[in-house]
Amino acid sequence: DARVTQTPRHKVTEMGQEVTMRCQPILGHNTVFWYRQTMMQGLELLAYFRNRAPLDDSGMPKDRFSAEMPDATLATLKIQPSEPRDSAVYFCASGEGGLSPFFGPGTRLTVL
Amino acid sequence: GENVEQHPSTLSVQEGDSAVIKCTYSDSASNYFPWYKQELGKRPQLIIDIRSNVGEKKDQRIAVTLNKTAKHFSLHITETQPEDSAVYFCAASILLRGTSYGKLTFGQGTILTVHP
């Protein structure tokens, strides 16, 4: 049963620190998404890639967030410097053919 | 860009009753509408989806209807059970032949509680 994996599952850090979240998409999926979930904003799309190329990162604060896919098996989302308002659950999802993506288990980030 | 509105934000029903969640979308180009279920502390999981070339789709106790003219779609759950309690999200997307990318815009979610 293929699944999207994410690490770490939980992260507590102090304001100003760098945070790196990693995602391994389902093998063969050509599209990777990063979503952020908060109670107030729901599920927000931060960025997504198709065939490793960034297609849209308009939902991402450019000054502190960056997303990359160094290879087909790894996607990363970095926050530098982190702020308390970045506290949320960050989901990676992968998909194929434009249909509904499969979500990973999420990284719960707390910035103190 | 696309905007998806979802109602109600909370829904409480008795076991065995039906539950209906409604969503409206703004972009008439949207042609793909999935529904996700998210249990507490878990990932969103796809439960059913519908494309704009059909008006209704069923899968056991779950059905989705789509009205393209009015730009709204609904999730219907019949014979609800306590394990149906979760947050349900609707979403809208544009599928383009040959270049589909599945960028989903989500509704705000509906907290469904099914009382035994």
Image: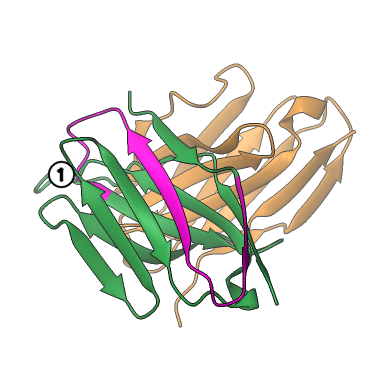
> Would you place residue B41 above or below residue B10 in this image?
below
Q: Is residue A72 left or right of residue B79?
A: left
Q: Colour of chain A?
A: orange
Mark 1: few/some/many CA within 10 Å (<14, 14-19, 20+): few
Tell me where the magenta segment starts and ends, as one range. B10-32
- The vertical placement of B78 against A77, above or below, is below
Q: Position of residue B43 (x, y in %)?
A: 59, 61
Please state which of residues B112 and A39 is positioned toward the viewer in this rendering.
B112
Residue B63 left/right relative to B32: right
Chain B, colour shown:
green
Q: Residue placed farthest to the top in the image?
A: A63
As for residue A18 lying within the magenta part, the answer is no
Q: Which residue corresponds to mark 1?
A: B99
Q: Amino acid at mark 1?
A: Thr
Q: Secondary structure at mark 1?
A: loop
Residue B52 visible to the viewer = yes
Q: Position of residue A30 (x, y in %)?
A: 30, 56
Which residue is at 53% across, 71% downward?
B17
| Quadrant showing the C terminus of chain A | top right
Chain letter of the residue carrying label 1:
B
Residue at screen point 22% across, 38% down: B30
